[in-house]
Amino acid sequence: MQLRIPGPTPVPEEILGAQTKQMINHRGKEFTALIRKITEQLKGCFQTKGDVLILTASGTAGMEAAVVNTLSPGDPVLAVTIGAFGERFADIAQRYGADVRRLAFEWGHPADPEAIRGALKAAPDIRAVLVTHNETSTGVTNDLESISKVVKEFDKLILVDAVSSIGSIDLPTDRWQCDVVVTGSQKGWMTPPGLSMVSMNERAWQAYDKAKMPRFYLDLGKARKFYDEKGQTPWTPAVSTFYAMSAALDMIEKETLPKIFERHSRTARAAREGVKSLGLKLFPQEAYASNTVTAIHGPDGVDVKKLLQILREDHGVVLSGGQGKLEGKIFRIGHLGWVSEADIEEVVKAVEAALPGARA
Amino acid sequence: MQLRIPGPTPVPEEILGAQTKQMINHRGKEFTALIRKITEQLKGCFQTKGDVLILTASGTAGMEAAVVNTLSPGDPVLAVTIGAFGERFADIAQRYGADVRRLAFEWGHPADPEAIRGALKAAPDIRAVLVTHNETSTGVTNDLESISKVVKEFDKLILVDAVSSIGSIDLPTDRWQCDVVVTGSQKGWMTPPGLSMVSMNERAWQAYDKAKMPRFYLDLGKARKFYDEKGQTPWTPAVSTFYAMSAALDMIEKETLPKIFERHSRTARAAREGVKSLGLKLFPQEAYASNTVTAIHGPDGVDVKKLLQILREDHGVVLSGGQGKLEGKIFRIGHLGWVSEADIEEVVKAVEAALPGARA
């Protein structure tokens, strides 16, 4: 079975196996050693000297943590959205009472830094910008470096949903001045779902001190205090998933980040070239096509749902459909984490074989 | 190594092993079958015909979910507290703006239903009562049946922290009219931490419809909608922990609830009799001593921290100290989930052997 959705991603046997270690006291020395090791490795992957906190929860909770730990109800925020996950980030802020102004771009297109500059110029009261690095729903990677530069011209806080990018696509957190960056264990990290990792820099902690949105389980200040003072988490951590993450980070360290980014770039190219060679069209603007997920137009006359079913049942290849308004219109190949060009070549062959049966 | 803290609890090999199954699509049929099976089994264990929702998060998040899904800022609530976890429940409600009135009982004692009746009579504006079934910090089990009866005389909502009780100590959710009941996978469920399970009855859903506290990741209405309509969770679930939970629930079903409650009762008695036979004193009133955790006074002249260290390092027995104001004053033996009388007899022997070395 080839599971090629944009998460959960396949987990190498040795990482799955790491989960079979017996439970330990999460208030004991052994756990402290484990979380300190993982946290230091994560800081390396995030390319940050700031804090990285690990939450027992999935990526959406990490996005919520980014919002509630830095903002207050009524705060004007600019939510840059290019797809379903950008909308989700905006929805979270709205739910907690932020004054959300959405700057939406056509799905399949990246955000235009110039338009962001215009929006920030027009609304000097904006306190923070919410932005998706890699939009999983459309297969688009934003030019985060340029976007962040613009945000920093106006000295605003930037909160980044990097759930499906960091660790697979280069995101130098400190160099790009990203104040809060969020990811989830089941993406490029080759780890089962259940952990969300969130970085906070000094600027973010300053915002934390003033932030009035309610929070308890997702209180990052409490997480930092427990980590700094005791090497613990405030609430019981997902111990098995910590074991898995530790094994995964060792593999990542061994391969090295530059080689991982390069592998994702090659694999994504194989996906794009492969589907184009079948006469299929990419959904996103190709210059901004993601290195972790490829979104493809369902060709005329093809029932996308049926295509996915044939792939799954006859070829053992599991791909994703479209989300929200793209349901039935596109399909998506996830290629992040434990994946090679050879895997993707197999997927493309399976798509080729499955297409005729999916024509109406 | 004997891990005898009140969670994480030891996990049987076959349940640890269940985690090594490869990832699956959380939007596919196989996951739907898995979550439907687990949910039905959990309803049996909760003894409810209501809903049981599974959150990827630990027990504290479940407590937060109970609060934010049923209450609005400004709502007067009665928080019955008999220890650290009762205080935590009250703190959560306070953080989200509830008007929290604490009814605190001396640590080591249970809540007095008569006092609750008095408090409810004196404050007819109370909307909900927060109560701990089993207070892990003091080793006390409240008489929840009587407490719930009093709460229902006044027709108030009751939110129950049953994190360390349900599944190990009888809690017939529907019969006792408990509107919201919360637990966590790492307690009696013999599963690694990372999931919280929350039941909601019709009364709780009526409260949900009016509740205005902000929520996104912990939105139980969204969880119900995804479960009912698709057999999915709104956000990526901790797939490996679901596998483990499924294996654990099969073991629980095989043993049967009455036998599990009986085993916990016997094991707790072994703990209490064992430590008393060493001349040690129980911290709680014995009539209310918990069947899942035994709290013991640190005897005069014994350094509790040192005792725990000797137990851990020389005898391979991991116990817990006291929390909050009980730190250094008591120690606690967890006996829930995968535990037998023989295990506890070994623990008692180790305590006996370790005591002399811990005397100052």
Image: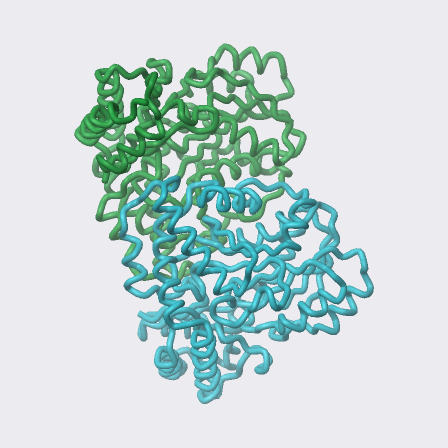
Chain colours: A cyan, B green
Q: Nearer the viewer, residue A278 or B68?
A: B68
Identify which residue is drawn at 23% across, 17% down: B278
Left/right placement of residue B117 relative to residue B250 reads: right
* Above or below, A63 relative to A289: above
Count of residue discs:
0
B219 or A360: nearer the eye?
B219
Q: Position of residue A40 (x, y in %)?
A: 46, 58
Residue A105 rendering spot, x and y as whole percentages: 68, 70
Q: Position of residue A226 (x, y in %)?
A: 49, 42
Residue in front for this viewpoint, B300 or B238: B300
Residue A214: quarter of image: top right
In this view, which residue lies farthest toward the front?
Answer: B360
| Nearer to the camera, B343 or A176 | A176
Q: Is residue B52 visible?
A: no
Residue B66 lies, with reference to residue B132, above or below; the image says: below
Above or below residue A189? Residue A75 is above
**Which quarter of the rendered picture does the N terminus of chain B lie within?**
top left
Residue displayed at 27% across by 50% down = A21
Query: From the viewer's perspective, is B268 left or right of A200?
Result: left
Q: Is residue B280 visible?
A: yes
The image quadrant that residue B52 belongs to is top left
Give the percent coordinates (x, y) of residue A205.
63, 50
Left or right, residue B25 beside residue B13: right
Quarter of the figure that contains the C terminus of chain B: top left
Q: Residue at x 20, y 31 (%)?
A: B343
Residue situated furthest left in the rendering: B342
